[in-house]
Amino acid sequence: MTSLIGQSENIGYSFSEPTSANVKQHSFYPYTDNGGSTLGITGSDFAILAGDTRSTSGYNINSRMVPKVFKIGGDDETGDGAQILLSVVGFAADGNALKEKLDTVVKMYKYQHGKPMSVSACAQRLSTILYEKRFFPYYVHAILAGLDEEGVGALYSYDPVGSYEREQCRAAGAASSLIMPFLDNQVNFKNQYVPGSGEGHALEPVKAEPLPKETVKALVRDAFTSAVERHIEVGDGLQLMIITREGIEEIYHPLKKD
Amino acid sequence: MDHFPGTWGRVGGTKSPNLASLLTSPQPRNDVYGAYDASYLQTSGPKAHTSSPAVTGTSVVGVKFNGGVAIATDNLASYGSLARFSDVKRLRSFGDKAMVGFGGDVSDMQYLDRLLESMDIKENYSAHGNMLNAKNLHTYLAKVFYKRRSEFNPLWNHVLVAGFDGQGEPFLSSADLLGTTFSAPHLATGFGAHLAVPILRRKFPEELPLEEVTQEAAVEALKECMKVLFYRDARSIDKYSIAVITKDGIDLKEDEQIQGQSWAFAERIKGYGAQVV
């Protein structure tokens, strides 16, 4: 077999000769956008998380029933016992992985400490989970909801790498740019002034106050029915989860399927 | 057999090699073909992963009915635009009540098939026997896909998993190379997502309760879809496999022929190629 040994001390296969050819770059892109939109609003004793149920790839509708809002830390099948809600929108496979990771963390916390994880602790942990993948991020916008230690509605919103903040309301996903200004005006009363209170800069802004649950539910439905009209990736169904001291209520409303 | 890839397809040359020299050393034949371009056979440099599929299967179509799921693929494996292998079975069974329909890279399909078979055998040797249903299988496959895409070494497939869930209800769900998953009463991958899904949505509207979709109607609809796909998908063939999964087990037919083709419409198509009027 001596004849197989080439000049370069390597085994003399003809294909092992060094070349100056360009190394072929692989062009696999590990993300996709599955569309959809989510929205969260809090009140004095409740928090609402909502999302549409459409899943898209490009101009295709994959399915009309893929939920984006999940119960965290509850029973695997039914979700019973959960006290935290999570919505994820963006790349659905990352969203599912993130949801399962957070779910496991919240369950382990309960097993190890013998008490449920607080929403603020879960919020900080979610930020850490996202930041752990800072250089290969979960391509999702997450919103976490629950009730804080005082029983007041708590809502935390995230960017894909874990920056987070507690807010009164937040819209995320494909139609966020359509929904968020509506929320600014209707929840935080931005650009609303007390009539006749003055001229120009002396105008007195309307003071924002926590809204009652029924008002918020109506706002959420209005936000989504409007978003469906103007965004092709939003539609099919609206999944609403409302967390109160009594537990989590889940509501489904049909949306336009066009 | 010539065992030196560097000489494959580089026949002839000024020196006609004798058998003895062929067996002992490669014949570069550079005088005829120029230097051999070995760039695609690099043994050093960065590890190359699949960046595009090679031999591929086209659409998978599936539909749920009252009491089970029906799923179909054609029997073609293409190499680019070449219809390379015309008898490739792209429906694979798992246990006795679950099926996977594979689209995309065929070698990755064969890898996954081996993976699933070894899992099935291991399960069957265990004390409880194989209790994994189609829903479990789908979860597993989706996680394999997601893990591989996260390693930037994807398995280049889009699959449909058909069978039953933990409650014994008909189950049909999709998973792709990115780990994306979704489920619906009727699903199709690839070209089928454009051509077959609209047919299925018209025949079985999503408001229609599953109880009103019969097995016969589902199978008929799938045959219709395979025909339409054969008409318009250039990477398809008129031989297909179809599986019906019910509580009684899997009824798999792997050598079906598309029936009742009509190319009468072709005469009316004008305006392509050289034809002007």
Image: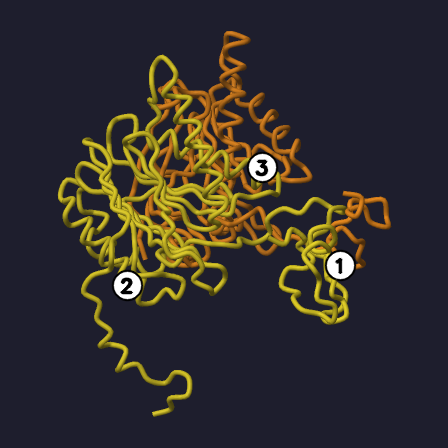
Say which chain is orange. A
Q: Which residue is mark 1?
A: A22
Residue type beneath disc 1: Asn
| Residue A74 percent coordinates (x, y) | 41, 20
- Give the spatial CA distance, label 1 vs label 3: 41 Å
Residue at x 51%, y 19% (from the top left corner): A106
Disc 2 crowd, CA 10 A, few/some/many (<14, 14-19, 20+):
some
Determine whether the residue tagged by mark 2 lies in a helix, strand or loop: helix
Residue A194: in sight, yes or no? no
Badges 1 and 2, same chain? no
* Contact between labelled residues 2 and 1, with CB atoms less than 8 Å apart: no
Residue B228's disc number: 2
Judge left or right: residue A258 versus residue B206.
right
Estimate the spatial distance between the alpha carbons at disc 1 and disc 2, rounded to whole Å.
Answer: 43 Å
Q: Is residue B135 above or below residue B125?
A: below
Q: Chain of mark 2?
A: B
Q: Are marks 1 and 3 in contact (CB under 8 Å)?
A: no
Quadrant in which the C terminus of chain B is drawn: bottom left
Residue A158: numbered disc: 3
The image quarter in which residue A252 lies:
top left
Q: Which x, y percent locates residue B275?
A: 37, 88
Does residue B145 appear in the picture of this structure?
A: yes
At numbered mark 3, what does the secondary structure look like: helix, strand or loop?
Answer: strand
Same-subunit check for callouts 2 and 3: no
Badge 1 element: loop
From mark 2 to mark 3, how far is it between C-alphas? 45 Å
A130 left or right of B111 in image: right
Picture quadrant of residue A125? top right
- Does label 3 lie on the same chain as label 1? yes
Chain under callout 3:
A
A132 or B56: which is nearer to us? B56
